[in-house]
């Protein structure tokens, strides 16, 4: 089954404790991206990757890191989480980079205390 | 001015009627336009894409694009309770955005009343 898999789905952590949200896709997609979704603000792009070893900032990259060492994986790293990073996070992928036809993961709800 | 703007709703429509969802965008050079549906607690899923002016129909869904007015809409005919969801408009490309950037509106919450 074609899918984008994120883990963990739910996480409660404390300020400053590093965490990683994993994302993996099995569709051989070139393009991958991370979004956060907050009430009233909609989906905002954090980082994206057009291919292996190619990443770039989206609209709200502060406090996040990413890496794309393999085509299928695109982890999101919060080095020192803060309460303002409490949000619902979505990983998404697409076959082509110049497209809006995204496949989304199920989402990861993160709470930072 | 927001880059992609939608009425947040909620929009209530009787079952069997036509639901009309609207979206405006600020970058006149935008090239591609998408509608995503997001059920409560779920992830967005693509339901329609449109790239040229006019109408595009897929089953009960019709997307309409008017680049001169910078306006894209989604019509849902014969609305069903299962259509109750938040609908996200997304716009790609354009002179300001760049081809890699997909910008989402904040969504319109649609409720179909049985």
Image (cartoon, rainbow, N blue to C red):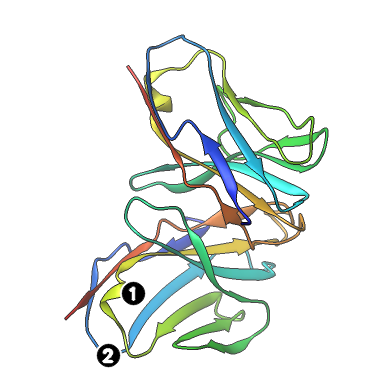
Q: Nearer the N terminus, badge 2 or badge 1? A: 2
Location of residue A3 in the rendering, given as x and y in whole percent from the top left corner? 60, 52
Instruction: Using the image, determine if residue B44 lies above or below residue A61.
Output: below
Classify mark 2: helix, strand or loop: loop
Check the image and report above or below for B105 versus A13: below
According to the picture, the residue beneath numbered tag 1 turns out to be B83
Dot 1: chain letter? B
Q: Quadrant of residue B92?
A: bottom right
Q: Nearer the viewer, residue B72 or A25?
A: A25
Q: Position of residue A29 (x, y in %)?
A: 75, 52
Front residue (pair B42, A98):
B42
Residue at x 69%, y 70% (from the top left corner): B31
Q: Which residue shows up at 61% across the image and 79% down it?
A: B67
Image coordinates of residue A80 in percent, x first then y, are 51, 12
Q: Secondary structure at mark 1?
A: helix
Q: Is residue A72 left or right of residue A77?
A: right
Dot 1 crowding, Cα within 10 Å, few <14, some 14–19, many 20+: some
Per the rendering, the mark at residue B17 is 2
User: Where residue A105 sits: x, y (%)?
Assistant: 53, 47
The answer to whether residue A1 is above or below residue A16 is below
Q: Is residue A61 above or below residue A98?
A: above
Left-right relation of A113 to A54: left
What is the crowding at mark 2: few (fewer than 14 residues within 10 Å), some, or many (at least 20)?
some
Chain of the residue under the numbered disc 2 shown in the image: B
Position of B73 with respect to A46 (left or right) is left
């Amino acid at each position: 089954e074609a899918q984008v898999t994120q883990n963990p789905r739910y996480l409660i952590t404390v300020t400053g404790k590093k965490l990683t949200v994993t994302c993996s896709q099995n569709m051989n997609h070139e393009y991958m991206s991370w979004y956060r979704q907050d009430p009233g603000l909609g989906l905002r792009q954090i980082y994206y990757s057009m291919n292996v070893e190619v990443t770039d900032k989206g609209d709200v990259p502060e406090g996040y890191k990413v890496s794309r060492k393999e085509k299928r994986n695109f982890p999101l790293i919060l080095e020192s989480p803060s309460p303002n990073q409490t949000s619902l996070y979505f990983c998404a992928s697409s076959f082509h980079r110049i497209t809006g036809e995204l496949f989304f993961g199920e989402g990861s709800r993160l709470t930072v205390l | 001015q927001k880059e992609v703007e939608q009425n947040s709703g909620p929009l209530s429509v009787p079952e069997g009627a036509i639901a009309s969802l609207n979206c405006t965008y600020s970058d006149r050079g935008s090239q591609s336009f998408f509608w995503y549906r997001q059920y409560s607690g779920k992830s967005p899923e693509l339901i329609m894409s449109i790239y040229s002016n006019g109408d595009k129909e897929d089953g009960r869904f019709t997307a309409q694009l008017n680049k001169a007015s910078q306006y894209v809409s989604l019509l849902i005919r014969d609305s069903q309770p299962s259509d109750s969801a938040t609908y996200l408009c997304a716009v790609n490309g354009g002179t300001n955005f760049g081809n890699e950037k997909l910008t989402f509106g904040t969504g319109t919450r649609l409720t179909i009343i049985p």
